[in-house]
Amino acid sequence: MINSYTSWQPLEEVIVGRAYTPDYFDFIDDAQVRNQLQQILSETAEDLDALSRVIEQSGARVRRPTLMDKDLFVRQQVQGQGAPLPPLTPRDWQITLGQKLLRVLPMTELDSICAEYADQVINPHNGSWDPTCILNGASASCIVRVGRDVFFDNSDFLRPDQTAWIVEHCLGPEYRVHEAVTDGHGDAVFAILKPGVILSSKHDMHLHLAEDFPGWDVLKIWDSSIWAAMEVGKFKYESAPGAWYVQGQTPTPEFTQFVDTYLKKWTGFVAETVFDVNCLVLDESTVIFSAYNKEVFAFCERHHITPIVSELRHSYFWDGGISCCTQDLTRRGGLESYL
C-alpha cells in the first residue's frame, strides 16, 4: 500500500533506479568512446546494487525498474535518435503524497511497479507522453513533504498552474500548501533529516527556512563536494565547465562529442548541484549519503543520526544523487503536523 507523508518516517519500501547495462552500447565503433561509456555504466550498476543492499539491510524492500528492450534501443541509436533517459532517477518523475502516487512524468520502465498500486496512482499522462498534459515539463523533485505541510517550488520546473493541479487532485483540505523557490532543484537545496533538523545549501537564498521552520537547526553547506572531487581527479574544468564530470577521467574529445550529441538527455549541470544534501533518510537515526562530508557528519552526530556512505561514483556525470536515484513508496506512520 502506498503510504508516505515525509522523507524521514521509517522506510519500508523504495524504488532504486537503474542505468542501462554496458552491452546496450556494444554497437559503438570507437573503442575508446565505447570503453569509457561502458565503464561508467558498469560502475553505476555496481553502486546502485550496493545502495540497494544497504537499504535492504535496514529491513526495507527495494524495487527496481525494468529496462527498455535492447534491440529497440540499438535500432534507435543506429538511426541517430539519441539515447532516451534510463530509469535512473525515479524521484524526478514521481512522488508519494500520503496514500497517492503522483506520476509527474511518464517512465515506461516504472509501469510494472506502479501497476501494483493502480488504485492509488495519479497519472495525468494516461501512461504515455502527452505534450498537452498539464504536468508536461514538471519535476517531482520540486515537491517537499513535511506531513501536513507541503512545499512546492514554483519555478521553470513546476509552474504555479501545475502546483494548483497537484493540490486539487492529490491533496485534501487537511494539507497546508507553501511556496518554496529553489529553481527546480528542491532535493539538492534542502533536506529534512528529522523534525527539527535540516540540511540546506548555498542555493537556499530564496527560501525562508527560519520563518517556515522556526526553531529548527539548519546547516547550510556552501561548497559542493564536486569541487574537491575535481581537484583530486583528472578533470579539466576548461574542457567542460561544470556541465558534467567523469570521476577519475579526463574525457577524450571524441567521448565528449558523443555525450553532447547522443546523450544530451542524460546530463545536467553538476557544478551547481550540492549532492551532500541529496540524501535518503532511512529513519530519524539513519541517513544514507553518497560521500563523506566532515561538516555534515559532525552535524548528524550532534543530532544522534548515523550517516552511512553508499558511494555513487558517477553522480557528477548523471547529475543524480542518492535522493534522485530513489523514490519511497511506503514509510511507517501517518499524517502528522510538524510546523
Image (cartoon, rainbow, N blue to C red):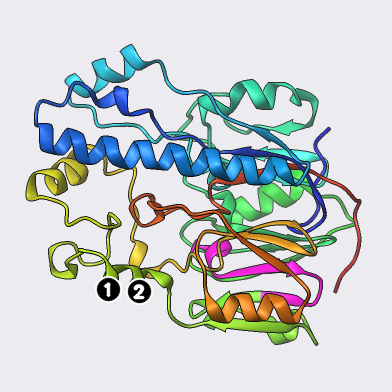
Measure the C-alpha gap from mark 1 to mark 2.
5 Å
In percent of the image, x 9 and y 31: which residue is there?
Answer: 30
Q: Quadrant of the C terminus?
A: bottom right
- Label 2 is placed on what type of residue? Ala
Q: Tag 1: residue type? A: Glu
Task: Give residue 176's position: percent from left, percent from top.
Answer: 82, 64
- Residue stretch in magenta: 184-198
Q: Secondary structure at mark 1?
A: helix
Q: Residues within 10 Å of mark 2 (few under 14, many from 20)?
A: few
- Whether pointer 1 and pointer 2 mark residues with C-beta atoms closer than 8 Å, the reply is yes
Eyeballing the image, is 277 above or below 139? below
193 part of magenta stretch:
yes
Front-most of residues 240 and 5: 240
Query: To which quarter of the image does residue 161 belong?
Result: bottom right
| Residue 162 visible from this viewpoint | yes
**Is residue 123 rendered to the left or right of residue 28?**
right
Residue at 16% from the left image edge and 67% from the top image edge? 236
Residue drawn where x is 18% and y is 62% of the image: 240
The secondary element bearing badge 2 is classed as helix
Percent across and percent down for residue 59 are: 78, 42
Q: Which quadrant holds residue 74?
A: top left
Q: Which residue is mark 1?
A: 231
Q: Is residue 95 visible?
A: no
Residue named by callout 2 = 228
Q: Position of residue 72 (x, y in %)?
A: 33, 14
Q: Is residue 249 left or right of residue 282?
A: left
Q: As rendered, which of 339 and 278 lies closer to the eye?
A: 278
Q: Residue at x 42, y 21 (%)?
A: 68
Image quadrant holding the N terminus, namely: top right
